[in-house]
Amino acid sequence: MNLQQGFAEVLAFFPGGADYRVCFAGDSVFVVKELVPEAKIEDLWPTFCGHIYCIASFLNDIDRRIGNLGIRVVISYGALLQLYRPDSWRHELFAKFTKNWFVLTGASEAFTKTVKAEGLGKKCAFFNQYCWHEFPNEPDTYHGTPIKKISLELTGLPELYPLFYQEMCSKADRTARLEPKNN
């Protein structure tokens, strides 16, 4: 089973999973929850992080059972990149340079941070078998929580997602930063 196939199959078991946009790059999976500008991230973040932790718990268990090292999860937030003129490439001046055109609009800041954390990996303390979650009031700082197995029955209860987030925060035993702090 590859990560993409496993993720696609697992997401169906988690209520709310249909609200996400999912894309794949290599062996990485990106899950995006788009919010309206008026939304308060502080109110929604615990549910989103708890939900992702449940999914990660299940996937990590599968990954370990087939002999792999376990997954690394990085949960980031950021502003949405919005294209205002998505058909501008059709203009005669651009058309000859844009034979193939693919644009993913979305959470560009969060993608950038997540890809950077994934690239830094162990050398900056982003270890496998951890769920790394950024705190909204601490940009570019990630708290790492070991990924523990959660009963599948409990992962299907959305009202528990904020509680899983609280547990993630209380059991975080590592910290990593995208950029070193200036002293």
Image (cartoon, helix red, strand yellow):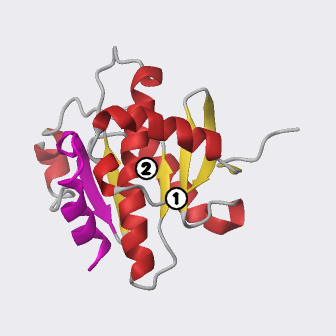
Q: Secondary structure at mark 1?
A: loop
What residue would you read off at disc 1?
147
User: In this orientation, does residue 82 appear?
Assistant: yes
The residue lying at 46 percent from left, 41 percent from top is 164
Which quadrant holds the N terminus?
Answer: bottom left
Verify whether residue 23 appears in magenta: yes
Magenta residues, as a range? 1-25
Q: Which residue is mark 2?
A: 53
Q: How many marks?
A: 2
Q: In the image, residue 33 lies at what x, y percent?
A: 30, 38
Report the quarter where the C terminus lies.
top right
The residue lying toward the viewer, choosing from 135 and 70, is 70
Q: Residue at x 41, y 80 (%)?
A: 65
Q: Nearer the viewer, residue 172 or 87?
A: 172
Residue 129 lies left or right of residue 156; in this view the side is: right
Q: Nearer the viewer, residue 25 or 84?
A: 25
Gap between marks 2 and 1 measured at Cα: 8 Å
Q: Position of residue 115 (x, y in %)?
A: 48, 56
Image marks 2 and 1: residues in contact by CB distance under 8 Å: yes
Relative to residue 79, is residue 130 drawn left or right?
A: right
Hey, what amino acid is under mark 2?
Tyr
Residue farthest toward the top in the current orientation of the protein: 38
Q: Viewed as shown, does residue 129 lie left or right of 155?
A: right
Q: Looking at the image, which residue is at 26% across and 46% down?
A: 156
Tell which residue pokes out farthest to the bottom in this image: 67
Residue 78 is at least partly visible in this image:
no
The quadrant where residue 167 appears: top right
Q: Secondary structure at mark 2?
A: helix
Q: Residues within 10 Å of mark 1 (few under 14, many from 20)?
A: many
Residue 11 point in image, percent of width and height: 23, 55
